[in-house]
Amino acid sequence: MQKNIGSKLALYPMPLLVIGTMVDGKVNWLLARHSGIIGHDRVMVSLAKLHYTNKGIKDTKILSINLVNEEMLKKADYVGSVSGSKIDKSDVFEYHIGDSGAPIINNAPVVMECRVENNYETDTFDNFIMTIDNTYVQEENLDEQGKIDYTKFSPVLFEFPKYTYLRTGDTIGNCLRLDK
Ligand SMILES: Cc1cc2nc3c(=O)[nH]c(=O)nc-3n(C[C@H](O)[C@H](O)[C@H](O)COP(=O)(O)O)c2cc1C
């Protein structure tokens, strides 16, 4: 029997992301849980307007979305706990600058370098809608066909009700070919 617990955000777990931007010419990192896919060629991140990161995104229109593996989790958690407006977070991760100008975490398993196309603003959030300029993948996370193999690393997931990090589990079937 289901119980109605009211209007709740229940779309979890979600992949944990480190967002990289340049703010006034300096690298800044932020931890994000709220993201989405729009159609087949756009992604979205939902960031509170007060964050320092938002200034950089609005000025440059360029950002990186770095998937988080367990190795990066401690640093990722840290960049979600302090603001670049107070503390310099530029050296938390080793990085290089991507082809479109966003800071890219060297050891991140998968990174999308994105360009802002639109901002669907709500009262307190910027919801940046972006196209993807480049996708950088650690070579060991690619299969023989050059596709990203998500079983080769452990993308960290996040869930809100208990505020915890989870790891992805086993492959349990082939999509649309469950019997194969
Ligand atoms: C697990 C976790 C997930 C977070 N997800 C988001 C998010 O999706 N959107 C958001 O606006 N802030 C999110 N935050 C908060 C920011 O990462 C945090 O306030 C950060 O310090 C802002 O950095 P900045 O001011 O340097 O941009 C999250 C924090 C944590 C710990």
Image (tube, grey):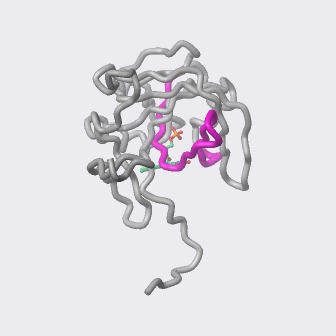
**Residue 179 falls inside the magenta stretch:** no
42 shown above or below 145 = below
Q: Residue 8: image x %, image y %?
A: 55, 70
State which quadrant residue 141 falls in: top left
At x 40% / y 26%, what residue is drawn?
147
**Residue 38 falls inside the magenta stretch:** yes
**Left or right: 101 with respect to 80?**
right
At x 34% / y 41%, what residue is drawn?
155
127 shown above or below 137 = below
Kindly report the secondary structure that dominates the magenta region of the rendered protein. Answer: strand
Which quadrant holds the N terminus?
bottom left
Q: Which residue is the extreme one toward the top?
A: 99
**Left or right: 6 with respect to 151?**
right
At x 66% / y 39%, what residue is drawn?
128
Q: Which residues are drawn in magenta?
A: 26-50
At x 45% / y 59%, what residue is drawn?
12
